[in-house]
Image: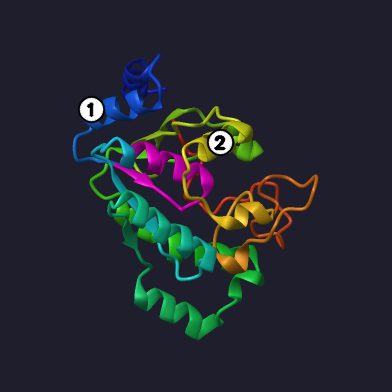
Amino acid sequence: MNVLTEEISELVYGKDTVQALTALADRFPGKIVFSTSFGIEDQIITHFIFSNNLPIRVFTLETGRLFPETYYVWNRTLEIYKKDIEAYFPDTHAVQQLISQKGPSSFYESVENRKECCRIRKIEPLQRALEGAECWITGIRAEQSDNRQGMSQIEWDNNNQLLKFHPIYDWSLDEVWSFTKAHHIPYNPLHDKGFPSIGCAPCTRAVREGEDFRAGRWWWEDTSKKECGLHATETH
């Protein structure tokens, strides 16, 4: 833990979620962002930010391969809260080159190809979205995967050189659903169809009973750490 993470840990200690987000927005004026993929966890944090008019910029990565249901909840969120959600698209030339050379489904052929697609459609746009930011809010929860259980609520992201704060890191899935229903927060209908984690349509399937939370992501890969690189664990 570095000096900044220690400072922020003290800043948010004992505060509820809204109080913590407010304190961070004051500590990083104009340089605090929240990334949403419109999953149920992200929708809760969007609710906290928009309902309390917190000065936190909200953005999403429009990969070009999202589910229709994701666009549905995106639209519902705009209708209900009437706040902007900035969309970051992948570089057009990079996508054109990838598709021209390898076709539209190269990510099924190897882990390297899949990571290349993730880099073009997600990692590079994320880096643009984070430019100038000093604090990045996410909807990560510890229960979501073994990899994420090794994280902390407050982290230093060495790759992006900024602080990361996961407001609902310790929430259980039951708490997530209870809060969502109590506050009538719009959520992706795919969650009702066995999709606990929702990414790009070609790379996500429903999870079967007894499977891991993230088993539906890149299900054709034989790996225990199914991450696209957005939340790399190179933290100090």
Q: Amino acid at mark 2?
A: Val
Taking the magenta stretch, the answer to whether it contains residue 189 is no
Secondary structure, mark 2, is helix
Membership of 34 in magenta stretch: yes
Quarter-wise, where is residue 91 in the image? Answer: bottom left
The one of 78 and 125 positioned closer to us in this rendering: 78
Q: Is residue 201 above or below residue 39?
A: below
**Residue 62 marker:** none
Q: Is residue 119 visible?
A: no
The image quadrant of residue 171 is top right
Q: Residue at x 48, y 85 (%)?
A: 100
Residue 9 versus residue 220 in the image, above or below:
above
Q: Which residue corresponds to the image point at 77% horizontal and 47% vertical from the top-left?
A: 211
- Tell me where residue 12 appears, x and y as whole percent: 36, 20
Residue 167 in the figure: left or right of residue 151 = left
Percent coordinates x, y for residue 162 in the rendering: 33, 38
Query: The C terminus appears in which quarter of the rendering?
Result: top left
Q: Which residue is mark 2?
A: 176
What residue type is disc 1 on? Arg
Answer left or right for 131 relative to 215: left
Over which residues does the magenta segment extend?
33-49
| Picture coordinates of residue 150, whole percent (x, y) | 58, 31
**In the displayed structure image, the side of residue 211 where residue 173 appears, left or right:** left
Q: Residue at x 28, y 54 (%)?
A: 84
Q: Which mark is residue 27?
A: 1
